[in-house]
Amino acid sequence: MRNAANRSVEGTEKYWAVERPARAAARAATRNAAAAEIGELTDREVLLIGAIAYWCEGTKSKPYRRHECVVFVNSDPGLVLLFLRFAATAGCVPSQFVFRVHIHENADIEAAQRFWLRTTGASRDQFRTPILKRRNPKTAHKKVGAEYYGCLRIDVLKSGDLYRRIEGWVTGITSATSSSG
């Protein structure tokens, strides 16, 4: 004979068997509708978005460490491609890019290299030796498996002028947003 607890568990499982796909479909519909609102980006929009993305994810010069060069690091292929488009729109050429994968030592390093090569369309000679992150046995890492490709670091050679332009674009964007109201 089934008790109330078993019936409750079965009821919950049945509910979520129907509810999970419905919620996933609703999330996908919202995401797709929002993506459709964007459309094609102009060069100006790419510069604005790219400058902010860089300011969030790129290296920045500090008063105590002047380092005016462009270095962008991210694990999201979409953001990496946005940055590359941004850099090209800003006047960079492909030969200015140097790539390096940063990845946990227990991951599939070769698969990650192949993934980033395909994603960026760069040549193999633009890729440097990967940087391996040592595993801390006390940490439960979720960054494992077939879909983990680490982070990609992109150094832009001879990029001091671009760095200063990014600083200017970000200043212009943040000044414009703080003065409107």
Image: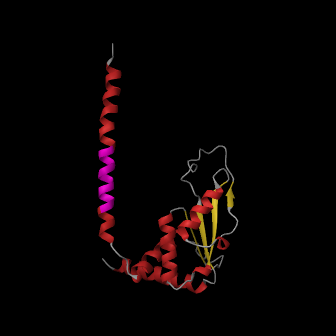
157 horizontally vs 168: left or right: right
Task: Decide which of 21, 11 is in the foreground and name it.
Answer: 21
- The image position of residue 69, as x and y in percent, is 61, 79
Q: Looking at the image, is 130 positioned above or below residue 20?
A: below
Labels in figure, total: 0
Instruction: Locate residue 30: give its quadrant.
Output: bottom left
- The image position of residue 80, as x and y in percent, is 52, 69
Residue 22: say if magenta.
Answer: yes
Task: Decide which of 127, 59 is in the foreground and name it.
Answer: 127
Q: Which residue is located at x 61 percent, y 81 percent? A: 96
Q: How is the image coloured?
A: secondary structure
Classified by dominant secondary structure, the portion drawn in magenta counts as helix
13 horizontally vs 158: left or right: left
Q: Is residue 68 visible?
A: no
Q: Which residue is located at x 65 percent, y 73 percent? A: 126
Residue 173: say if magenta.
Answer: no
- The image position of residue 156, as x and y in percent, is 60, 78
Tell me where the magenta segment starts and ends, as one range.
21-32
31 horizontally vs 128: left or right: left
Is the N terminus in the top left, top right, bottom left or bottom right quadrant?
top left
Task: Decide which of 81, 160 is in the foreground and name it.
Answer: 81
Q: Which residue is located at x 35 percent, y 22 percent? A: 6
Q: Looking at the image, is 47 positioned above or below residue 74?
A: below
